[in-house]
Amino acid sequence: MPPTTPANDVDLLRGTLDLLVLKTLSWGPMHGLGVLRSIEQATKDRLQIEEGALYPALHRMEQRGWLDATWGYTEKNRKAKFYRLTPVGRRQLAAEVTRWSRYTEVVGMVLAARGT
Amino acid sequence: MDREPEPGASWPGLRRVFRLPANQRRVHDEVSDELWFHIQERVEELMDKGLSREQAEAEVRKRFGDVTRVAYDLERIDERAVRERGRAERLSAFGREVRHAARMLLRTPAFSVIALITLALGIGATTAIFTVLDAVVLRPLPYPESDRLVSVMHPVSGAGVEAGKWGTSVAGYFYFRRENRTLSDLGVYQTGRVSVAGDGEAERVRAAYVTSSLLTTLRARPAVGRLITPEDDRPGVARVVVLGYDFWARRYGSDPGVVSRMIEVEGRPMQVVGVAAGGLNLPRPGAFASNADLAGFGVDLWFPLRLDPDARAINEHTYTGVGRLKPGVTPEAAERDLAQLTARLPELFPNAYSPSFMREYNFGMSVIPLRDEVLGNNVARALWILFGAVGLVLLIACANVSNLFLVRMEARRHEAAIRAALGAGRGQIATHYLAESLLLALVAGALGLALAQAATRALLAVAPTNIPRLSEVHLGWTAGGFAALISLVAGVAFGLFPLLRGVDTRPLREGSHGLTPSRPQRVVRNGLVISQVALALVLLAAAGLMVRSFARLRDVRPGLDPRGVLVFEVAAPVARYRTYDDVTAFQRQLHARLGALPGVQSVGATTHLPLQGFTGCAVVFVEGRWPLRPGEVPPCVSTPRVTPGFFRTLGIQVRGRAPDWSDIDAGTGAVVVTRALAERLWPGEDAIGKGINSNGGTVSNYYRVVGVVDELRAGGLEKPPTEAVFYPVRALPKTWLWEPARIMTVAVRTNLTRPAALTRAIRRAVTDLEPRVALANVRTMEEVVERSMARASFLMLLLGTAAGMALVLSAVGIYGVISYIVGQRRAEIGIRMALGARVSQVGRLVVLQSLRLAVIGVALGLIGALAGTRALRALLFEVSPTDPVVLVIVSAVLVFLAALASYAPARRAARVDPVEALRAQ
């Protein structure tokens, strides 16, 4: 792994990054940069992602069969690698979403609890 | 790669040149492309927002992180994916190939079944014989470092003695043990049978009398307690006994408490000091050991031999010697060493060994690997011959299957051509064929293994019990590996053999209109048939020779009449029967009781039963020829002791008269000699009335010859007529006939169709007379005769089976090829018939074609047989390995078979309708 950022940051991001990528791709096929732009848009640039980390995540998910990749051309007629969610990936997304909401719910419960 | 040049030059890692295999190269390019796109887009994006190129690039680099590192990670991930996908693809390609091969084989069931059965037979037979060969001949003896064990024996030969090997003498053992410089240890043993009683039913068990040094030589270990130590092995100390492992388990239920108890052996109590470890057996006793038929060579009881180092040296060689070579010493070196010691025997022990004895008997020394001694020349030779025979069967089977594959390939030229036209490489087509042949061969191998399992069991059932180490035979990993190996080799061979000419992909040009197959194809096919016939002839000749030899052996008159005779061993306990008189009285009572049983016609007993255990020899002296002339050496001949009734019971014809009980009572010393001995001792004279003994002229008593046995082959049917003197059980005064004959084989002649029905009554009669006497080894004399021919009949049976298989396979081969040729030549035959050829002419054409192949094969086979059957010489009896009768008969059989095999195809050819045949083209 690129040792450019502190390890705990990456760790925090990695599990979440998969979820974000899957979710983004559930709207339709796009290339790596497209995924980034979509996330930036959705978060109104409030989430800073280390761009280099995106690609290993994409390739790993491709290898696991969650994503399909094909080469295609952008509007500017540039060759780019496009990713698409597979049925397996779609199921994975659902599972990740459930886990994430359960996680936030639990964390939220703790944060909302008042000390006695 | 057409990509705009610049500004990527400033992105190290994206344009690196890789010298990697194609797929890895592609991975690298794709990763570069993907990241390149990202960075390019991002830089333009920022430049659109007004940044300069340098600023934009710096910003992108900051956001992205280490590009080289990311590219490297991506390549690792992708390469792994590529590798895994490749493996999965190869696996499924393999599965596809196997499925395809199976489908193709199933589409031609006749071909597949015939090829499968043929191959399975060949592999099964070869594996079965290999299993036996491996266990009996190839595997080392079951002792630690057994390759250093040697047998130590004295070979003898000459006019006065049957050629063979004598054991060592007592004095010789101590002398060799002390003086040799090549053995790290040397021990001797004898074997025999003893009665065990007292703690259960009395029984006769197998006994070994060994020096403690024998056990250290073999590196034997105890399972419980201890083995025989040097302290046990001195004359005069109390007798101790060590139990054999199996005997311990059987009789004492593996109770360790039996150690230090007393058991009763031969009527005398003995202390058990230990149990030998499981599987400890003795090597086969030498030819002159006391009892040659220790079935399986298992030992039930081990006794110390207690030899006396100070005893007077006598020329008695009854101890089998086993030595352990010092590291690095060869048997030849040890033999030279011990031969030098042997040559000095006359000077060390002048009373026992005279220089003339050494010379006349060619008394020497032989040190050979113990395994070779155990096996004997002929067993190893016979098994190798059998292995060769089934190897030939396998070759014939392979030739058959090769031929089938050739035909099959011929038939599939279209398919191959179409595949080639569709872009399949020669390699791919070859792979298809290889997959089919391998699949077929491996299935045949599995079938063959199952066959071998059954065959091995059948083999063990019919095998003579006197083949050593047979108990060690079982189908194991070695056999499995062997079967797998030959199937693999065969599979590859069949797959590649038809491809020798290259994959034939021409037919689209050539079409199917050729009248005859291509010439090389025909040559190969005919060559296969010819070699099959040749191989079959060699096998048939070998089997024929064995059959003829066996027939000769059967024709030999052993000089006795085994019909209706039951024999068994009886041992009188030494504690009660000490003298000649005791033993004689015991036998006389026994004879009376057995003679009174219903159905019994006569009873007799002997220390040596003809055709089994007629071993050992003693010198004989003639009355009136004493003292011996200087340098004269008396002959050494068989000297069994028999009771009156022996000759009548075994149906041995005696000229003159046989002794009766009144001779015993009166002490007339009446004896019978065989004609072979009489002719040696008194050439041209009548032996009857002559005097003879085994003690020499210093005593005055001679036995008187009252009868001559005309013909007797007691040592074995293949041996020359026996030279023997039959002494009485009761020795004359002033003569000595060894220890009183306590152990004798009793023979009972009955008028029953099943003499064995008497067994129970006999056992009761014996026990009534003497409860401590155990009966052993009850069998009919006919069984004894059969068994003496067992090895010959076993070899004949197996060679015959192999030859039969060869015959059938060759017939199938000839039939297949001739049928095929007829099919191929339909058009030609049609033309011939259209031009007026008669039906009989066409039929003759086909049969002649087959005969031509057969005759060439027979001619080649005869050459092979003349060269090959020489290996059989030592196993044949009165038949030359090049016996013309056998060779002529088997040649005729094969030619006839070829004619027969082509008969059906010939008829089919004769029925060809010219019009139809030509239209089919």
Image: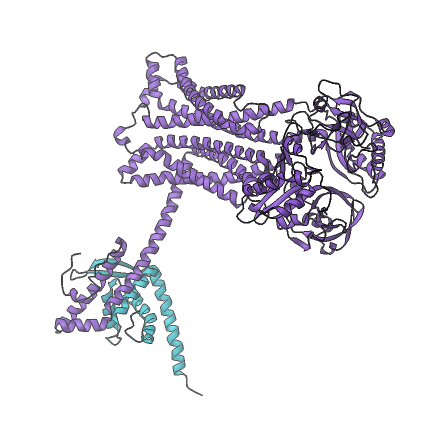
Chain colours: A cyan, B purple
Q: In the image, is residue A50 above or below residue B485?
A: below
B827 or B581, which lies in front?
B581
- Please indicate whether residue B546 sits to the left or right of residue B309 in the image: left
Q: Quadrant of the N terminus of chain A?
A: bottom left
Residue B747 seen in render:
no
On the image, which quarter does residue B13 sit in?
bottom left
The image position of residue B392, as x and y in percent, is 48, 31
Query: Which residue appears at 35% of the width and 55% of the height?
Result: B84
- Residue B16 placement (x, y as % from top left): 21, 61
Q: Position of residue B875 (x, y in %)?
A: 57, 29
Q: Position of residue B297 (x, y in %)?
A: 65, 42
- The reply, left or right, for residue B622 in relation to residue B46 is right
Q: Quadrant of residue B718?
A: top right
Q: In which quarter of the image is the C terminus of chain A?
A: bottom left
Kindly tell me whether residue B809 is visible in this rendering. yes
- Comparing B364 with A116, the one in front is B364
Instruction: Please say if B723 is above or below B363.
Output: above
> Does A30 sit above or below residue B197?
below
Pick the front one: B508 or B454: B454
Q: Total number of numbered labels? A: 0
